[in-house]
Image: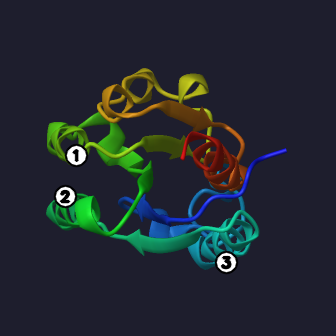
Amino acid sequence: MTKSTSGNILILNGPNLNMLGTREPEIYGTETLSDIEEKCKIHAGELGMTVTFRQSNTEGEIVNWIQEARGTAQAIIINAGAYTHTSVALMDALLAVGLPVIEVHLSNIFKREEFRHHSYISPASVGVICGFGSRGYLLALDALADIL
């Protein structure tokens, strides 16, 4: 059983995740990002936490949100989408804020194209959850309840 905690968790979503529900449903499922946000808010409430849920297709905007989290969040859950495999800037920002980070992916990135097997986010993360669809976000919240 996961223990109860308090705190705000920043959940960040990268490029194209706003297209969930219609984008390659055979890979990403049919849930929308709004569906996932609602599940996260409910589950976080059950754990005594709150979430701030954001999505951007712009790398710099995500970097800004990460930097702003230092004074407002206790941890970060991030599904950086394609930026996972390309963004040193996101990795540097995550390392700089010094908060616990959990990396989440809807699909199992290790069963996909070779370029998706490398993550720049992982070195800044306490853990990685991939391949469980939207349940991965809830698992990340459970893990943070234990960590915090």
Determine crowd level at label 1: few under 14, some 14-19, many 20+ residues with C-alpha closer than 10 A: many
Q: Which badge, 3 or 1, is on the more N-terminal residue? A: 3
Given contact means CB atoms under 8 Å apart, are the residues at marks 2 and 1 in contact? yes
**Which residue is under mark 2?**
63
Residue at mark 2 to residue at mark 1: CA–CA distance: 6 Å
- Horizontal arrangement in the rendering, residue 98 relative to residue 3 (left or right): left
Q: Quadrant for the N terminus, please.
A: top right
**The disc labelled 3 sits on which kind of residue?**
Glu
What is the number of the mark on residue 57? none
**Which residue is under mark 1?**
90
Name above or below for residue 112 compared with residue 96: above
- Horizontal arrangement in the rendering, residue 85 relative to residue 97 (left or right): right
- The percent position of residue 53, horizontal first and vertical second, equals 47, 72
Q: Residue at x 60, y 56 (%)?
A: 24
**Which residue is under mark 3?**
38
Q: Which badge, 2 or 1, is on the more N-terminal residue? A: 2
Pick out the residue farthest to the right: 1
Given contact means CB atoms under 8 Å apart, are the residues at marks 2 and 3 in contact? no
Residue at mark 3 to residue at mark 1: CA–CA distance: 25 Å
Q: Residue at x 14, y 62 (%)?
A: 60
Q: Residue at x 64, y 42 (%)?
A: 146
Tell me the SS state at disc 1: helix
- The percent position of residue 140, horizontal first and vertical second, equals 61, 47
